[in-house]
Amino acid sequence: MTTNVKKRRSRRLSGPAAGLLSLAALLPCTGWTTQFGPTVTLDSLAPTELTAGQSAQATARVHSDACFTPSRFTVAVRDAAGNNLDFPGEATTPQICPSGYTFTSAAESFAPGTYQIFPSYRLGRHWHPLPATTLTVTTPPPPPTTTGPDHVVVAVMENHGLAEITGNPAAPYVNSLFSQGTSYTNDTGKSHPSLPNYLDLYSGSTQGQDGSDTCVSLAADNLGTRLDGAGLSVGGYLEGLPADPDYACRHNPLAQFTDAVSQNAQHDFTAWPTDFAALPKVSYVVPNLQNDWHDGTVQQGDSWLKDHLDGYVQWAKTHNSVLVLTTDENSSDTDLTAPVPLVVVGQRITPGLVQSGHVTHDSVLRTIEDWYGLAPLADSAAATALPGLPAFTGAAPTAPDAAPPAGSPVFSDTFTTPVAEGGFSGCDSGDRSSILTSHCTGLPAAVDGNWWAYPDGTPDTTHNGSYTPSKVLSIADGALHLRMRNENGSNLVAAPLPKIAGGNGPGGGRSYGRYEITWRAVDPTPGFKLAWLLWPDSGNWPTDGEIDFPEGSLNSEITAAVHHQNGSSGNDLDSYSTGAAVASGWHTTVVDWRADHCDFLLDGQLIGHSDTLVPNTPMHWVLQSETATDGTTPATGAQADVYVSSVRVWN
């Protein structure tokens, strides 16, 4: 592309931004000329593509058949309407020669659209445009939907196996984490000694360092570089970095890699923020040798974790974040089969859940990679993510208030009126549309006003048991007592129902509310089950759904479930495990049922959140206590005692 310069008459121009001829007038021309002027050729011009809002410089490369010095050189821009939107900046008195000249403007950004860009130089009073190139500016794509926890903290302790920590009175805090989160009883280290395990946790490979404990310099891909490539951040918080005698370089996974991301993300633990929202996306925390169980005692390390990380743990439970706690290896120098501690705690994590399948450090790394949609590193590609953990997709659930709502409950019973066994007699058959007007004639008026029960002789769900409130239910010492049992070959169970005033359903049921009950199952007696549920007044199941909590055989764990509105089978549900045994002391369970979601709380902890096809028709509450539905039948003479001390309902 050239312009030949000859002398000709021209109109006066004042500058490229304000006075260049219109694009229609300029572009057809081959150029401005003088009698002895050189020929100028455009070699390259960029950019040709941009994203709206993206700032970029224009670069033009030209050469001429003879050296000359124009007074100014710039890159002009015209939109579809011919408006001047030039790149800022120009060169004054540049020398353009056969060897070439390159001009670079200042940066500019443009709205979406199609533009013509062209270099132009000024000789004397005249501007000489070179051939134009099309610049296409596109609308930026929407930001990707973020997945994964808001923050992950991986804390690594030293040289202790699971058997050395579980139940150890010197480690009360770590043992409390096992009940607060999901733990793994068969997690093994990757190698011996320490260094290769830290490398594996960060890069998915021991990097050929098995048997070595000397710090290295590796130019290998790692979690830090993967996160950085996805626009996410990594950090390392190492107690005593860099000069404390108890700081161990070999326990710092980031220090082993030469990339700038890993090198620049290392901090002494004194930089640990008080505002946890300021943490990187993924952080590694390693105490010093005295506090990581390497040289100090178990109690010393346990106290360090509580003092330095419990604030984050409790914050994480309501901020879509997690803690992963493990050790690098067990205490053996050769055995890799003895499990090491591993627990994950945070929001969406099931408390008290125990997983027994075999996992490794690669599983920990793969979990983090999957959470953030990262390509797996090295050996983690063949690993599976830790089981029992949520995918962390979609918006984080809003943590409900564990405290009761303001205002008085619409139903409350703390069982102050005694009723001997046999008092729940004469329960009329009623039907599912007349709970509020059904009665058990043997009850005192104060209790009859609050309770009804499925009548004697009504079969339970499996038909292996018979609802028999007259022989199963009683009230004493401030508690409703359910004495389920096998008696003379018959399995006696009961299903009491609270009469909650103000319902809008045909059977006295209600649409939405907060349902709270405090209860205790004494023994894990096989063959009996709790299935305390909200059941649709319509009786139309599965179409109108169902909400269950607590649910579980007495010798199993407490679970929760929401059967979806408009369900076509019993499998249309969201279910949640708690890891807490049904027969494990007193518990308070809450169903917080709203129009757009349903939350489940166990002892003040959110264990489940559903916002998918939540039931929307009136439901009544049934404390359905029955024979197990897993095929287990009660043994001859077996008895299962369940106590309820408080029942409350709010709008």
Image (cartoon, rainbow, N blue to C red):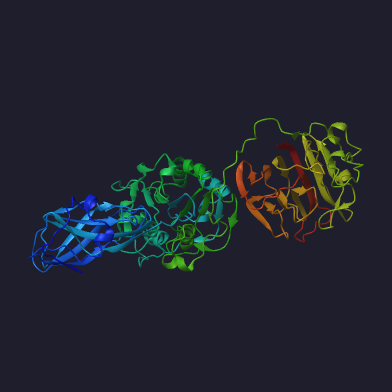
Residue in the picture at 45% in, 40% down = 307
Q: Pick the residue in front: 334 or 342.
A: 342
Residue in the picture at 80% in, 58% down = 633
Q: Percent x, y for residue 14?
A: 18, 50
Q: Pick the residue in front: 74 or 448.
A: 74
Image height check: is 478 above or below 205?
A: above
Instruction: From the viewer's perspective, tell me whether residue 109 is left or right of residue 324.
Output: left
Image height check: is 503 above or below 624?
A: above
Q: Quadrant of residue 190?
A: bottom left
Instruction: From the viewer's perspective, tell me whether residue 496 is left or right of residue 21.
Output: right
Q: Percent x, y for residue 506?
A: 82, 44
Instruction: From the viewer's perspective, tell me whether residue 369 is left or right of residue 419.
Output: left
Tag count in the figure? 0
Can residue 326 be seen in the rendering of this structure?
yes
* Quadrant of the snapshot with the N terminus: bottom left
Can residue 117 be seen in the rendering of this structure?
no
* Quadrant of the snapshot with the C terminus: top right
Residue in the picture at 83% in, 47% down = 494
Q: Quadrant of residue 62?
A: bottom left
Q: Percent x, y for residue 552?
A: 71, 52
Please identify the residue farthest to the front as the structure is shown: 9
Q: Pick the residue in front: 81 or 313.
A: 81
Q: Percent x, y for residue 321?
A: 49, 48
Instruction: From the viewer's perspective, tell me whether residue 635 is left or right of residue 48.
Output: right
